[in-house]
Amino acid sequence: MNAIALHARPSDGFESKVAHAAAVLASAAAEHVTRIVQATSLGAEDMVLTDLIARAQLPIAIGTLDTGMLHAETLALLARIESHYGLQVQVMRPAQEAVLHFVTRNGERAMFESIDLRKACCAMRKLEPLGRLLEDKTAWVTGLRREQSDHRAEVPFSEREANGRLKLNPLADWTWGDVWHYIAVNNVPYNALHDQFYPSIGCAPCTRAIALGEDFRAGRWWWEDEAAKECGLHVQQVEGVAA
Ligand code: SF4
C-alpha cells in the first residue's frame, strides 16, 4: 500500500486550508519581490508548497540543502521538480573543506557518538548552507506543521525572526491526511521513501522507517532523547514566538 492509500484523508475545512495557504504565499510573494525563497526539504509538505507556488506561478525561488548525506530517492526529486514544473531548484552544499576536516577528525559516524557531534554535523551540513541560501532574503517559506511534533504544536502561519526576516509556515494547520490528499488530487511528485514508511525524511544515516503506531518523527535521530530532536533549522528565537 503506498503513502497516498495509507494517508490521504482530508480534514474538515480542507478546501479553506488550501485557499489560505495559497493566499499566504501570494501575499508574501507580492510583498517580498525577488527576496523570498522556499527552503524545501523535498519532503511531502514541501512538495505541496512547491506545487502551490508553481500552480500560481508565484515569483518565489525554490532552494534546498544537499548535505552530501541524502538518499538517492531524495536527490531524484530535483530532476522531477524540474521536469514536472519547469522550475530550477537552487542547491546549497556545505563547504567541502569543513566537511573534510570534520570527517577526518571525527569519523563518518560521528553523529552517533554524541549529541554535540551530531549537532556540529547538522550545523556544518545544514545551518551554514541555509544561512547562505537566506542571506539576501527577507522572507522564507517552510513546510512546518503543528501536528509534526510537540515542539511544533504552536507553529504560527508567520513569525518574525530576531534578525527581522519573516518565516512563513503556510501549512501550519494542515494534517498529514490533508498533505496526502492534496498530493493525490493534484498528482504531486513525491519522495519514493514515503511509500516505504518514512514520513519524515532527512539525511540517510539519521533517518529510518517507522513502525505502525510510532510518532511522525520517530525515525529521525531515533537514538536521541525527544528533547534533542531538532537539527537547528527551526529553533531560532523569533520575536514573541519560539519556533
Ligand atoms: S542529519 Fe545527520 S548526517 Fe545530516 S547533517 Fe545532521 S547529523 Fe549530519
Image: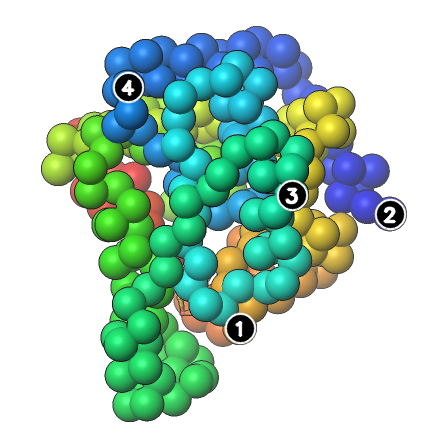
Q: Cβ of disc 1 within 8 Å of ligand 1?
A: yes
Q: Which residue is mark 4?
A: 33
Query: Is label 1 or label 3 in front?
Result: 3
Q: Is residue 74 above or below residue 47?
A: below
**Of the image marks 4 and 1, the number of the one nearer the N terminus:** 4
* Distance Cα–Cα, label 4 vs label 1: 37 Å
Amino acid type, label 2? Met
Image quadrant of residue 164?
Answer: top left
Q: Which mark is residue 80?
A: 3
* Distance Cα–Cα, label 4 vs label 3: 26 Å
* Distance Cα–Cα, label 2 vs label 1: 25 Å
Image quadrant of residue 231?
Answer: bottom left
Q: Residue furthest right?
A: 1
**Looking at the image, in which quadrant does ligand 1 appear?**
bottom left
Amino acid type, label 1? Pro
**Of the image marks 1 and 3, the number of the one nearer the N terminus:** 3
* Distance Cα–Cα, label 1 vs label 3: 24 Å
* Distance Cα–Cα, label 3 vs label 2: 22 Å
Q: Find numbered disc 4 in the image and state the secondary structure of the residue it sits on.
A: loop
Q: Which residue is mark 1?
A: 205
Q: Are there few (<14), some (14-19), or many (20+) residues within 10 Å of tag 3?
A: some
Left or right placement of residue 35 versus residue 22 in this view: left
Residue displayed at 52% across by 15% down:
56
Amino acid type, label 4? Val
**Of the image marks 4 and 3, the number of the one nearer the N terminus:** 4
Q: Are there few (<14), some (14-19), or many (20+) residues within 10 Å of tag 1?
A: some
